Image: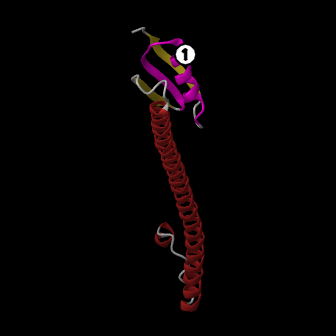
Amino acid sequence: MALSGCNKLDDNQTAGQKLDLAIGKTEKAAAEARVQGEQSSADVKAKTEAIFAKAGDALKNATENAESSANVFANKAINKIDDLAITTAISSELLKDAEIKFFRINVDTKDGAVVLKGTVPTDLVRERAAAIAKTFSGVQSVDNQLVIKAK
C-alpha cells in the first residue's frame, strides 16, 4: 500500500521489464517532443517568412516612393530648363525684331505659360511681341500684359 501511494509499479517486474517500460516511456516522450519541435519550427519558419514578406513589401514601397519622388524632381528640373530656354529664345527673338528691339520687354515663363510685361508705344508693337512669343515650341499660352504708352 505504501508503494501504491508513490505510483510505483509492481515490484514483481523483472529488471528487463522495468527497462523496457522505461524505454517505452522515453520513446513516447521523445516522439512528443519531436512533434512539438516540428510544430515550433514550422511556426518559427512561418513567422520568419511573414516578417521577411512585410520587410520586402516595405522595401518595395520605399523604392517606389523614392523612384516617384525622383521622377517628380526630374520633371520639375526639366520644366525649369524648358521654361528658361523658352524665356531666353523669346527674349532673343524680340531683340532681333526691328520694331521691338528698342523697347524693354520682360519675358517670364512658368510651365510653358509666357507672360510679357513692359511698356510699348503702339498696339501694333504689343501684338507683334505676343505673336513672336507664340511661335516657340513648348509655349502653352501667352499672357500679354504689355502696356501701351505713347511717347
The residue positioned farthest toward the top in the image shown: 150
Measured from the top left, where is residue 147 in percent x and y?
45, 12
Q: Is residue 124 visible?
A: yes
Given the image, on which type of amino acid does mark 1 rest? Leu
Q: Nearer the viewer, residue 81 or 54?
A: 81
The residue positioned farthest toward the front in the image shown: 98
Q: Say which residue appears at 48% left-offset and 16% top-offset.
A: 145
Measured from the top left, where is residue 23 in percent x and y?
56, 84
Q: Say which residue appears at 54% left-offset and 82% top-offset.
A: 22
Q: What kind of element bears circle 1?
A: helix
Q: Which residues are magenta?
A: 112-136
Q: Nearer the viewer, residue 112 or 29?
A: 112
Q: Is residue 13 visible?
A: no
Q: Nearer the viewer, residue 148 or 22?
A: 148
| Magenta highlight on residue 70 | no
| Magenta highlight on residue 135 | yes
Residue 135: which quarter of the image?
top right
Vertical comparison of 29 with 12: above or below: above
Vertical comparison of 26 with 95: above or below: below
Measured from the top left, where is residue 120 in percent x and y?
44, 16
Which residue, given by chain and number where applicable, does mark 1 sit on? 124
Q: Nearer the viewer, residue 112 or 132?
A: 132
Q: Quadrant of the C terminus?
A: top left
**Other residues around mark 1 within 10 Å, as few (<14) / some (14–19) / many (≥20):** few
Q: Say which residue appears at 58% left-offset and 80% top-offset.
A: 27
Vertical comparison of 112 with 35: above or below: above
Label count reads 1
